[in-house]
């Protein structure tokens, strides 16, 4: 009995970590608009799109995320910055979530 189950356990032990390190799942799809490809190119090297699609941020907050990501090594072409921000605010802006920011005078 033991002889039979042991290799099975070993097999599972070697499969599970391997699949956990497999290339990241693509995440939720980004809306197919003109900036999709640029955002994908600049923003999915280190994490998948879910990091983006699960957010509901104001323009200032997305801007702050850009700065943070650049600090981590992201490359965001200056020429695309505004259009990328527009794309993110339009699709993942605060209006898509609860109106949690409406009381904040800073935004
Ligand atoms: C050089 C690698 C890298 C690139 C490129 C990158 N990110 Fe990130 N991103 C990270 C890391 C690392 C974290 C986790 C940071 C943390 O937990 O503090 C993260 C987290 C996030 C988060 C979650 C919120 C947070 O503060 O943790 C958002 C939103 C995000 N990234 C958006 C973007 C966007 C938009 C782009 C493209 C402009 C981008 N990322 C490109 C490395 C990167």
Image: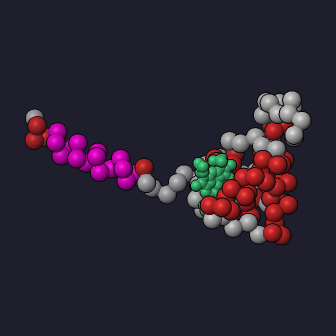
Vertical relation: 75 (above or below) 89: below
* Residue nearest the viewer, comparing 64 with 81: 64
Report which quarter residue 38 is drawn in.
bottom right
For the stretch drawn in magenta, the main secondary structure is helix
The x, y position of residue 106, in whole percent, is 87, 40
Which residue: 85% across, 60% down? 83
Residue at 81 percent across and 63 percent down: it is 81
Direction from residue 1 to residue 12 in the image, left or right: right
Quarter in which the N terminus is drawn = top left
Q: Nearer the viewer, residue 37 or 79?
A: 79
Q: Viewed as shown, does residue 79 lie left or right of 37?
A: right
15 in the magenta segment: yes
- Across and down, in percent, residue 107 comes to 87, 40
- Ligand 1 picture quarter: bottom right
Magenta range: 5-19
Give the residue at x 72% y 52%: 65
């Amino acid at each position: 009995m033991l002889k039979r189950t042991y290799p099975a356990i070993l097999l599972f032990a070697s499969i599970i970590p391997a699949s956990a390190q497999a290339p990241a799942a693509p995440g939720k799809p980004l809306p197919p608009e003109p900036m999709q490809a640029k955002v994908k190119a600049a923003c999915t090297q280190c994490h998948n799109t879910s990091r983006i699609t699960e957010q509901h941020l104001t323009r200032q907050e997305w801007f702050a995320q850009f700065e943070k990501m650049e600090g981590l090594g992201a490359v965001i072409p200056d020429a695309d910055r505004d259009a990328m921000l527009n794309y993110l605010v339009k699709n993942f802006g605060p209006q898509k979530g609860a109106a949690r920011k409406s009381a904040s005078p800073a935004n």
